[in-house]
Amino acid sequence: MKLKSLAGLGVLAAIGFASCQSETKKTSSTDSLKSDAAAVVKLVPDSFKKEIDGKQTALYTLKNKNNAEAVFTNYGGRLVSLLVPNKDGKLVDVVVGFKSVSDYEKSTEPYFGATIGRYGNRIAKGKFTLEGKTYSLFTNNGQNTLHGGKKGYQYVVWDATQPAENTLVLHYLSKDGDENFPGNLDVKVTYILTDNNELKMDYEAKTDKTTVVNLTNHAFFNLNGDGSGTILNHEVQIYADGYTPVDSTLIPTGKIEKVAGTPFDFNKTTTIGARINDKNEQLTFGKGYDHNYVLNKTKAMGMFHAATVKGDKSGIVMDIYTQEPGLQFYSGNFMQSKNTFKSGAKDDFRTAIAMETQHFPDSPNQPAFPSTVLKPGQLYKTSSIYKFTK
């Protein structure tokens, strides 16, 4: 969905969201199951109960008829665990994460599984101008702002309701001036685990003052299972002929370059590790892949088909569909073995990847990029789907 053509995408008149009250639900986690990758860890709901900023955190489990499960906490709107069947029909947890809220609080990597906002990805030098006014944000990524600033949505406690066994609705009112962004932004995110083993992510937002918005989820995937080791042998196909090259601080230069003839060409299925160590300035800047792909207009399931990823050991295939124009492919280059996953394994270098559906980084400062501006009376509305097959 391109915000500069909101009307063309069927945007409705702005509607108010009913404020969702935080709901603590007793949830039972799947008992430990053996797979050819790693044991599925039983999560303890009490380990996710804590009062943070005067609000209660909890664990929420979504289930479908195939015994697949998606487990969330409302602390940061995080996807903690995602169980899907492998080629042998055994459940594998394809999302890395932690065993407690406290582990997420103290993690040196703040984005594991989180719902990201107000602006996903980077804004150059923490500044942008809207309607003649310049806004200065907290710079938390060198000289730039990353994923919403000092206290992005990964650190807030969302109001949560579970209207059905397979559905979680998260709500957050990001107030005017939150992290210095303008406007009261009313955000609703709905996560649905379908009977086709799809995790559907529906985002909505409205504002009372012109602002910028770029929402996404920052799940870290290892399709062989949490704690199963390197992702370099995962096979990847990205349906994009172009990408946005970056400078040394990972801010887009403003150009869109062809991937053909470069290590960034995943139009044909290629392992992540095949060219990740090639001599290439962009790979040096990102310490691997940490770049935004400009998606082709390949339609599937009523969306753009963004990417296909396959676990080399599990045989699990993840197809990503989105209404967003971009996909950030991150190959786990800054993982430093400083955190312990729920499996007991460390978050070692390149043991998980992120595939974030998004508008482009630094769009507020890049007029040629699809707009991320949201005005009063408009409704930000976009969906992405992560579908798992074997």
Image (cartoon, rainbow, N blue to C red):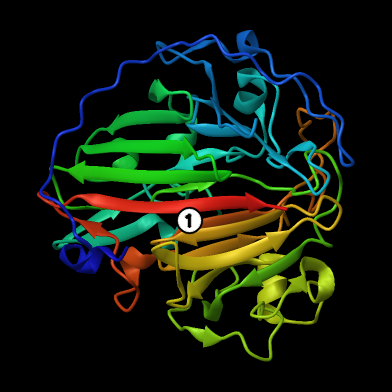
Q: Residue at x 46, y 83 (%)?
A: 255
Q: Residue at x 62, y 8 (%)?
A: 46
Give whichever of 91, 383 is nearer the camera: 91
Residue 60: x, y in percent?
53, 21
Relative to residue 270, is residue 128 depicted above or below? above
Residue 84: x, y in percent?
69, 40
Kind of residue indicated by mark 1? Asn
Q: What element does badge 1 sit on? A: loop
Residue 200: x, y in percent?
46, 45
Give whichever of 191, 214 is nearer the camera: 191
User: Can residue 370 be seen at all in this image of the molecule?
Assistant: yes
**Quadrant holding the N terminus:** bottom left
> What residue is disc 1 on?
121
> In which quarter of the view is residue 291 placed?
bottom right
Direction from residue 170 to residue 14 in the image, left or right: left
Relative to residue 16, is residue 146 depicted above or below? below
Residue 300: x, y in percent?
46, 67
Direction from residue 168 to residue 180 in the image, left or right: left
